Amino acid sequence: MVRVVEGIVGLLELVGESLGPSSWVEVTQEMVDAFAAATGDHQWIHVDVERAQAGPFGGPIAHGYLTLSLIPRFLPELIEARGFSMGVNYGCERVRFPTPVPVGRRVRAGMVVDEVTEVAGGAQFRATITIELEEAAKPACVAVVLLRRYL
């Protein structure tokens, strides 16, 4: 369920809270192929289904950066920060991919707001986002991200 907050004060109240999880999203071969086309990363473990079935993962896997790129898809299900005119991704402090995501499997995200600071014209929050792979012991991605919201 999305957590709705109002303005900078609302963001500050989230520090230390866990939000989510989001709904599940299936990672399809079409998504992987489109990501490969957009990035130029056509490594066979992602796009050559037949070869990948004989490879180390038993089938094609999503690009790690594809998994990371799903964060903007998950965020609206985790947090709605009202009272701001826009938001931007400011960067990542740390990203890890503990478990590969096989094509056809589902992922979802949860978030912990680690810190909120005021910046000129708005607020920046640092959050740890964990992308969980369904029925896996370890997450698919853990990213510490910086997000800004401007008034």
Image (tube, rainbow, N blue to C red):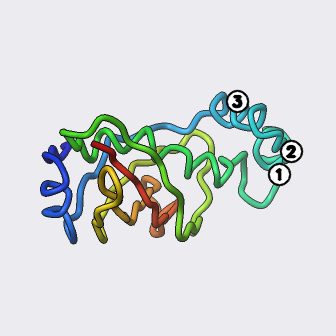
- Circle 2/circle 1 CB separation < 8 Å: yes
Image location of residue 33, percent across then percent down:
73, 32
Image location of residue 144, percent across then percent down:
46, 66
Callout 2: few (<14), some (14-19), or many (20+) C-alpha neighbours within 10 Å? Answer: some
- Circle 3/circle 1 CB separation < 8 Å: no
Position of residue 46 in the picture relative to residue 18 (left or right):
right
- Circle 2/circle 3 CB separation < 8 Å: no
Amino acid at the residue labelled 2: Arg
Sequence-first disc among 2 and 3: 3
Q: Which residue: 47% across, 64% down?
A: 139
Q: Which residue is mark 2?
A: 51
Vertical comparison of 69 with 116: above or below: above
Vertical comparison of 33 with 151: above or below: above
Amino acid at the residue labelled 3: Ala
Q: Which residue: 18% across, 43% down?
A: 1
Q: Secondary structure beneath disc 3?
A: helix
In the rendered structure, find residue 34 and report the number of the disc placed on it: 3
Location of the C terminus (image quadrant): top left
In the rendered structure, find residue 12 and report the number of the disc placed on it: none
Q: What is the C-alpha distance between the residues marked 2 and 3?
A: 19 Å
Image location of residue 66, percent across then percent down:
62, 46
Image location of residue 65, percent across then percent down:
64, 51
Q: Which residue is mark 1?
A: 54
**In the foreground, 67 or 26:** 67
Amino acid at the residue labelled 1: Ala
Q: Secondary structure beneath disc 2?
A: helix
